[in-house]
Image (cartoon, grey):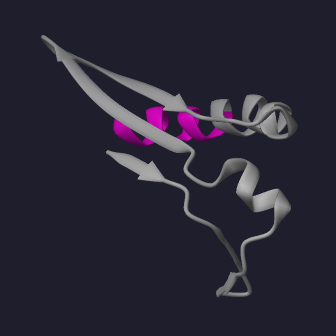
């Protein structure tokens, strides 16, 4: 599954493009499942600008842990 970031929503409304959103517009998030026998690996690739690296380093491991827990039930 892949997502291409096209802009920003705020209060459920599209925010007009601006200098900040133009820095990451077009960035991709790609998720791929690979099965090897009884095991399934989730591979994630995310395009991130320097400003957002710390956020993704903190948020993604938490989200992926939740996915792992849910998938193993």
Tell me if 9 is positioned left or right of 31 in this view.
right
Tell me if 72 is positioned left or right of 28 in this view.
left
| Of 56 and 64, the residue lying toward us | 56
Residue projecting furthest to the top: 37
Residue 53, above or below 17: above
Q: Main SS type for the magenta part?
A: helix
Say if the magenta span includes residue 56. no
- Segment colored magenta: 62-73
Q: Is residue 73 visible?
A: no
Q: How many marks?
A: 0
Q: Quadrant of the N terminus?
A: top left
Q: Is residue 17 visible?
A: yes
Tell me if 14 is positioned left or right of 70 in this view.
right
Quarter of the image for residue 11 reads: bottom right
Quarter of the image for residue 15 reads: bottom right
Residue projecting furthest to the left: 37
Residue 30 in percent (x, y) is at 42, 37
Tell me if 4 is positioned left or right of 8 in this view.
left
Q: Residue at x 28, y 29 (%)?
A: 33
Residue 4 in percent (x, y) is at 47, 53
Q: Residue at x 72, y 39 (%)?
A: 59
| Of 37 and 12, the residue lying toward us | 12
| Of 10 and 62, the residue lying toward us | 10
């Amino acid at each position: 599954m892949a997502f291409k970031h096209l802009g920003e929503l705020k209060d459920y409304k599209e925010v007009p493009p601006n200098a900040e959103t133009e820095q990451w517009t077009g960035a991709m998030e790609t998720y791929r499942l690979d099965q090897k026998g009884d095991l399934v690996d989730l591979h994630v690739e995310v395009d991130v600008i320097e400003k957002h690296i710390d956020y993704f380093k903190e948020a993604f491991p938490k989200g992926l842990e939740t996915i792992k827990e849910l998938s193993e039930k």
